[in-house]
Image (cartoon, rainbow, N blue to C red):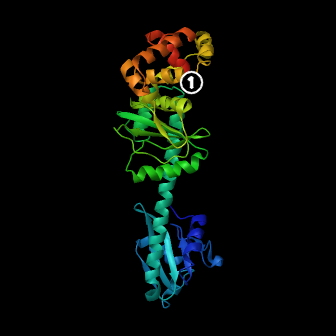
Amino acid sequence: MELTDHLGQEIIHRLSKYIDVAINLMDPTGKIVASTDHARINQVHGGAQRVIETLEAQQITKDISSQYSNTKPGVNLPIFHRGELAGVVGLTGNPDQVYQAAGMTQGSVEIALEQLYIQKQSFYQERQWNHWFHRLISDEDMEELEKEARYSLRADLKKAWQVVVFQTTSPFDFTERLRRQAEQLQLRPLFILPFQENSVVMPLPFQEHIPPFQTEGPAAVGEPGYSAKGIYTSFQQASQSIEIAGKAGEMIYSGAFKVERLLSSITKETYIEITEPFANRLNRLEAPYLETLDSFFKNDLKMNRTADGLHIHRNTLHYRLDQVHKKVGLDARCFKDAMILQAILINR
């Protein structure tokens, strides 16, 4: 990565607040691309050319400055980035007095180049993952996508993944906060991407317990799935769970909503056809009967546990269930009838 006009001028603008001598930044050809003295920009710096030839620091005194074109007394140091010459930094003044400042400037420029390189690589990789994920949910060839992930994105998908989906009103800002959270929790997500208008997607290698994330909107975790197909399925599960039961600021697990997800896959027409006559009658029931049904289903149709939980006698429980059967036409103690009653209660 080389020094450019825009980057060089931004670096000088920041450093000149703390360094009170003239600063020049030269590209790998020796041309001044940025300077505190704008008149020197685009001049070829002879001292920088000497640094480029030798790849060593050059201290130029007043006595020898005339040997180099467009050069004043000072210190010129090579700037390296990832083992390659990226340019030269020069500070004007007595070499003994400005050498330390020149070294600090050299280090600052090299750090800035590395950070910019990392940002560009991260941005490029994010775009690649974004494109890859959109193709995944479009149901493209899974084998080809796994090969692309392995060879182009350097990611081995041959393991179990769980996808976490977050809903947020500001996906780009939330993505950055989520990345910091993941780093603090020492997690290694495959990627963290804004998706569509209000979602952020994060596939994680499967682990028994996913740490809690700070989220302002609903969030859901899909069930573990293997490789690219597993990522696709886990994403669908998490997205569906948010639609069914998502609550702001809470993270839910799709495995806890299997029945709800199954019911949501039934067409609206079929659901209405089967449940409407019973639903109308159920909605007219008094509150104690609805509370009894809810408790009965939560206790897995067990009479004793339900009666204990409601603090009523077992005979009273039988009476209430008999009344539900009489008024609605469905017997909660019968498995098939219980399924229809549960479906109506869930969709209420």
Q: Residue at x 53, y 86 (%)?
A: 66
Q: Secondary structure at mark 1?
A: helix
Residue 100 image point, x, y percent: 43, 82
Residue 330 image point, x, y percent: 52, 10
Q: Is residue 86 above or below residue 235?
A: below
Q: Is residue 219 above or below residue 265?
A: below
For the C terminus, the quadrant is top right
- Structural crowding at the residue carrying mark 1, measured as other residues with C-alpha within 10 Å and reported as few (<14), some (14–19) or many (≥20): few
Q: Residue at x 47, y 14 (%)?
A: 319
Q: Pick the residue in front: 295 or 193.
A: 295
- Would you say 36 lies left or right of 184 here? right
Residue 52 in view here: no
Q: Pick the residue in front: 326 or 267.
A: 326
Q: Residue at x 43, y 29 (%)?
A: 256
Write down the quadrant of residue 311 in the picture: top left
- Would you say 159 lies left or right of 117 here? left
The residue carrying mark 1 is 287
Residue 318 in view here: yes
Q: Pick the residue in front: 13 or 178.
A: 178
Residue 16 image point, x, y percent: 57, 78
Q: Amino acid at mark 1?
A: Ala
Q: Pick the residue in front: 78 or 242.
A: 242
Q: Residue at x 60, y 78 (%)?
A: 36
Write down the quadrant of residue 210 in the picture: top left
Q: How many numbered marks have been drawn onto this rendered protein structure?
A: 1
